[in-house]
Amino acid sequence: MGVKVEVFRMVLYLTFPVAMFWISNQAEWFENDVIQRKRELWPSDKRQELEEFKERIRKQREEKLLRAAQRNS
């Protein structure tokens, strides 16, 4: 009985990650479901605001690094 249980567990441990990898890499499923859901959750106007925010943060970080580099020179 113990060997059968161990074999079942090993098959489960190997099959589950492979199955999840295979399912998550289905391009058609990804395009149809995930991208559509993303568009529902974050409309284009919200994405534009997010991109502007990211750009401001990136510029602030660059300026901070530049000032730090100038002080150390």
Image (tube, grey):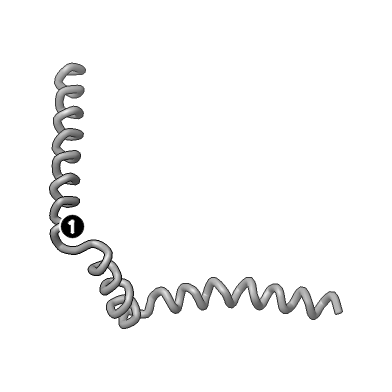
**Mark 1 crowd level (few <14, some 14–19, many ≥20, 10 Å Cα):** few
Q: Judging from the image, what secondary structure is the residue with disc 1 in?
A: helix
Q: As displayed, is residue 68 above or below residue 28?
A: above
Please state if 32 lies on the left or on the right of 64 as rendered.
Answer: right
Q: Amino acid at mark 1?
A: Arg
Mark 1, residue position: 47
Total marks placed: 1
Please state if 65 lies on the left or on the right of 29 as rendered.
Answer: left
| Image position, residue 64 (x, y; %) | 18, 28
- Residue 38 in which image quadrant: bottom left
Please state if 17 lies on the left or on the right of 29 as rendered.
Answer: right
**43 or 25, which lies in front?**
43
Residue at 20% in and 17% down:
72
Please state if 24 lies on the left or on the right of 70 as rendered.
Answer: right
Q: Residue furthest bottom?
A: 28
| Image position, residue 56 (x, y; %) | 14, 40
Residue at 49% in and 74% down:
20
- Residue 39 in which image quadrant: bottom left
Residue at 15% in and 23% down:
67
Q: As displayed, is residue 66 above or below residue 57?
A: above
| Image position, residue 50 (x, y; %) | 19, 51
